[in-house]
Image (spheres, rainbow, N blue to C red):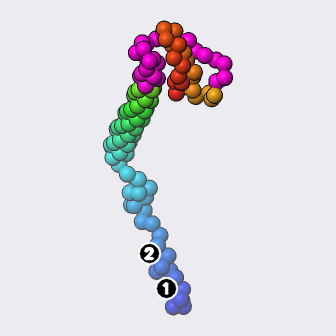
Amino acid sequence: MRTSHKRHGRFMAMTRPLPSLGRAACEPDPRQRQKSAAVFAAVHAFLASASSLIASALIGFWALRRYLYLLNHAEFVADLAVCRACDTWEILNPNDAGQPAQDRLRVRCKRCGHVWFIEL
């Protein structure tokens, strides 16, 4: 036999899998697979809960911030509804004639007739 054939034979013998090391040696233990699946499920449940909690907190924070902004704006507009001439509140007539802009409301006091604008 030639030398190159001998080398090829030895190479094939070394690279061939051993009969005792069949598929079972390459596969993990079924108990280990169950443990890793349980750990994965627990981590998945934790991450889902944590992300839901964070999303809920952010949405709640945004909603509270928006509510307080609108409440502050309503208080600001209510403060503008006081007649500066006679210091009365809520005795107003909206005067629609000649409205200068959409964000301004022209009002007139019923008691003294003073006219001013309320910024909306």
In percent of the image, x 44 and y 75: which residue is there? 14
Which residue is labeled 1 in the image?
7
Which residue is labeled 2 in the image?
14
Q: Residues within 10 Å of mark 1 (few under 14, many from 20)?
A: few
In percent of the image, x 44 and y 56: which residue is there? 23
Image coordinates of residue 9 in percent, x first then y, are 50, 80
Image coordinates of residue 77 in percent, x first then y, are 46, 23
Magenta-colored segment: predominant secondary structure = loop
In percent of the image, x 41 and y 53: which residue is there? 27
Q: Is residue 91 magenta?
A: yes
In percent of the image, x 48 and y 79: which residue is there? 11
Closest to the observer, 70 or 84? 84
Q: CA distance from mark 1 to mark 2?
A: 11 Å
Query: Callout 1, which amino acid?
Result: Arg
Asked if residue 36 is positioned above or below residue 9 in the image, the reply reads above
Q: Is residue 87 magenta?
A: yes
* Residue 90 visible here: yes
**Residues rendered magenta in the picture:** 74-99
Asked if residue 39 is positioned above or below residue 108 in the image, the reply reads below
Task: Residue 21: name its quadrant.
Answer: bottom left
Contact (Cβ within 8 Å) of mark 1 with mark 2: no
Q: Which mark is drawn over residue 61?
A: none
Q: Residues within 10 Å of mark 2 (few under 14, many from 20)?
A: few
Image coordinates of residue 61 in percent, x first then y, are 39, 32
Task: Residue 2: name its quadrant.
Answer: bottom right
Q: Earlier in the sequence, mark 1 or mark 2?
A: 1
